[in-house]
Image (cartoon, rainbow, N blue to C red):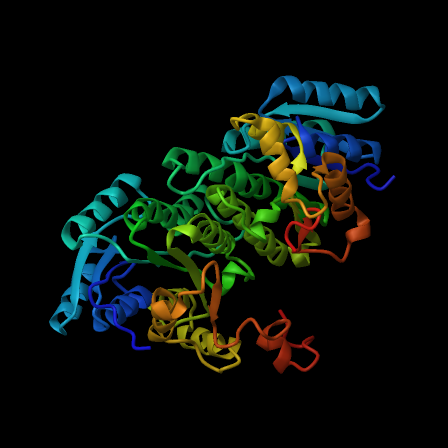
Amino acid sequence: MNLDFTGKVAIVTGGALGIGEATARKLAGLGASVAILDIDRDAGAKSATVIAKNGGICEFFPCNVSVGADVSQAIDAVVNKCGGIDILVSNAGIQLYGDAVTTSEEEWDRLMGINLKGCFLVAKYVVPNMIGRGGAIVIVGSVQSMTAISNSIAYVASKHGLLGLTRAMSLDYAQRGIRVNCVCPGAIDTPMLRWAAGLSDDPDKVIQTCDRMHPLGRVGKPEEVADAIVYLASPMASFITGAALLVDGGMLVPAGGMGFQEGGTGAATHK
Amino acid sequence: MKLLNKTAIITGAAAGIGAASAALFAREGAKVVAVDIDREPLDQISAQIGREGGECIAVVADVSQRDHVENVLRSTMQKFGRVDILFNNAGIVRPGTIEAISEEEWDRAMAINVKSIYLLCRAVIPLMKVEGGGVILNTASATALRAVTDRACYTATKAAVVGLTKSMALDYVRNNIRVNCLCPGTVETPSLTRRLAAFPDPAEARKNFIARQPMGRFGTAEEIAQAALYLVSPSAEFVTGVAFAIDGGLSI
């Protein structure tokens, strides 16, 4: 089956950079009319312009996904401009580190607002536009939708919540032609990963450590996650709903993590 | 007695699973701090535990509010001087698809079901660290493992609770603090009665709810409380980071 999204309208939240940008680019390359929603006006407008220059149909709509009025307005603008919505890629998200004690209430609220409530709000305003027409929603979760890493309490809670939301919405709309799935990437070479690595004194070493966490021996590329998203959004995945698709280079396969495997008994290297 | 001289904070203690757990923990020797937003039933539970010879104080609090949580800790430390067990059980169920749920309802459910756990843990963990360890138990839901229709917001909150549980289990594993969560199925509680009463035909709704139970019945609050007791007791010393399904087979 050829992947052809001609005539389809796709919204990508957090589409300015990283996985969102790669997804917007792929969908536009396959013929979709793409609406990038992002809070970053400069990067969002730039990504949309580059995609359009390369022959794609793409427009930028500024949006803070954690604010209902903002989301409602942006979705209305997309519908007015494009005539409807067929695909939603709910990708906007932030990361921050901290445990239950060191995470501030403000940080907690901000992350939960963007990562989890943002997904709810965008879906809330998109779904009525899909009913009767059908549609596909792909939510960008994480390996941390299923497992946890240390010092990442709010992020892990939000990503677990997204998988719950995926499953709940997939059931609620299964009979109305809307499929809802979740991709769960491992570490992907995005500005977010570079930011996280930059928190360390030796960012290159952090990336190398990330490489070694994956049995495939490297971090993923944004395009590799975008491929999985495009697949789930396409008719090729017409019997798939409520699924969580790992795109993690095998990260979650080894018991105790790769460090444990490489350490033999694991005792020497297991943190 | 499995919890002799342990101090246990239990939120959502005025009814259902929380009330049953407060009574059971007290019978097992725990000093109970019963927390709820609903004063009258909370006082009744507390008084009943006292009549049965248990030790219990009642603290009225909205656990989604930072200052209320701080007051819970103040009251606990004044009365008992330490915290060994924290059972984050307070929660609300707002039925509905994403379209039916308002932004305000979403915020409220997230605050009570998820943020309250963060707030209480943030206050309690430093104390547990000083004391050399402790046990935290959170009430998630079977819906965090397998979804049901018309519970989008609830499911998202409870899945987040599972994530929070695993994160904290990992973060504090070397501090001798165990963190687990319960994933109950549908349990015969006042909360369920209220939800059923909201249906046009509550008797029919009850029948439908029971029909989806593999065991053909609801769980009881006492059954969930027994699971809670196991997870907070020294019997579960090697158990951390788990989402413990207790749902009559619902999540199979």
In the picture, measured across the screen, residue A211 lies left or right of residue B230, that is left
Quarter in which the C terminus of chain B is drawn: bottom right
Residue B147: in sight, yes or no? yes
Residue B215, percent from left and from top? 72, 46
Relative horizontal placement of residue B103, taking residue A57 as reference (left or right): right
Residue A203 sits in quarter: bottom left
Q: Residue at x 51, y 54 (%)?
A: A160
Let me know if residue B77 appears in the view: no
Measuring from the top left, give residue B59's x and y in whole percent: 64, 24
**Which picture quadrant has residue B167?**
bottom right
Q: Nearer the viewer, residue B72 or B141?
A: B141
| Residue A17 placement (x, y as % from top left) | 28, 65
| Image label count | 0
Residue nearest the viewer, comparing B8 with A53: A53
Q: Relative to B142, does residue A188 appear above or below in the rendering? A: below
Tell me: A40 left or right of B175: left
Q: Nearer the viewer, residue B30 or B190?
A: B190
Q: Residue at x 52, y 42 (%)?
A: B114
The answer to whether B233 is drawn above or below residue A46 in the figure is above
Q: Residue furthest right?
A: B1
Give the side of residue B234 with respect to residue B166, left or right.
right
* Image spot of residue A109 (x, y percent): 42, 43
Residue, x 25% and y 52% (percent of image)? A39
Q: The N terminus of chain B lies in which quarter of the figure?
A: top right
Q: Is residue B196 above or below residue A267?
A: above
